[in-house]
């Protein structure tokens, strides 16, 4: 629903880029992933990697940008082949647990480093 809402408001290249990224994400969230899905995933990821430069060329991000979570998609096919599909697991869950269990208590501590 997001892409049709921005048609006509942003350049077509950006819409194509976002479409490729969403395709990549939707395929990665499948419960079961077979070889056809992996091939579709690699195709969509390749399109995204090629098209995301539009944000630099149109001066949206003229100095470039970091894509840490998107970069991890490069390793996704290899990981699925080695370990199997994640079954819709999202890394945001573990990140939020890490924040609650580690980061917040540390911020409330006296910041001494007893192990250091």
Image (cartoon, rainbow, N blue to C red):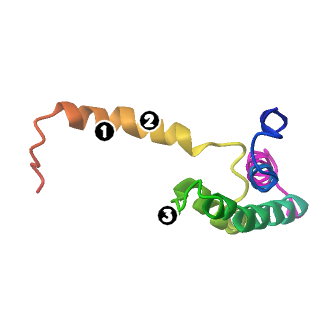
- Residue drawn at the location 53% of the way across and 63% of the way down: 64
Task: Using residue 18 as the reference point, say whether residue 69 is left or right of it.
Answer: left
SS for dot 1? helix
SS for dot 2? helix
- Tell me which segment is drawn in magenta: 20-35
Judge depth for marks 1 and 2 and give the one in front: 1
Q: CA distance from mark 3 to mark 1?
A: 30 Å
Disc 1: which residue: 103
In the drawing, what numbered circle is on residue 97? 2
Q: CA distance from mark 2 to mark 3?
A: 33 Å
Q: CA distance from mark 1 to mark 2?
A: 10 Å
Q: Main secondary structure of the magenta part?
A: helix
Give x and y (percent) for residue 107: 22, 35
In the rendered structure, does residue 34 fall within the stretch colored magenta?
Answer: yes
Marks 1 and 2 in Cβ contact (< 8 Å): no
| Foreground pick, 63 / 116 | 63
Q: Residues within 10 Å of mark 2 (few under 14, many from 20)?
A: few
Sequence-first tag of 1 and 2: 2
Disc 3: which residue: 63
User: Toward which corner of the image does residue 106 lie, by quadrant?
Assistant: top left
Quarter of the rendering occupied by the N terminus: top right
Give x and y (percent) for residue 29: 74, 45
Please tell me whether residue 70 is drawn above or below residue 9 in the rendered image: below
In the rendered structure, does residue 57 fall within the stretch colored magenta?
Answer: no
């Amino acid at each position: 629903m997001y892409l049709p809402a921005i048609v006509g408001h942003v350049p077509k290249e950006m819409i194509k880029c976002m479409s490729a990224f969403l395709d990549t994400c939707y395929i990665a969230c499948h419960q079961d992933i077979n070889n056809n899905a992996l091939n579709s995933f690699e195709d969509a990821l390749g399109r995204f990697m090629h098209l995301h430069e539009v944000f630099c060329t149109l001066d949206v991000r003229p100095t470039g940008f970091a894509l840490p979570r998107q970069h991890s998609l490069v390793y996704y096919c290899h990981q699925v082949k080695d370990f199997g599909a994640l079954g819709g697991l999202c890394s945001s869950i573990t990140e939020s647990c890490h924040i609650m269990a580690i980061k917040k208590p540390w911020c409330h501590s006296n910041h001494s480093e007893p192990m250091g």
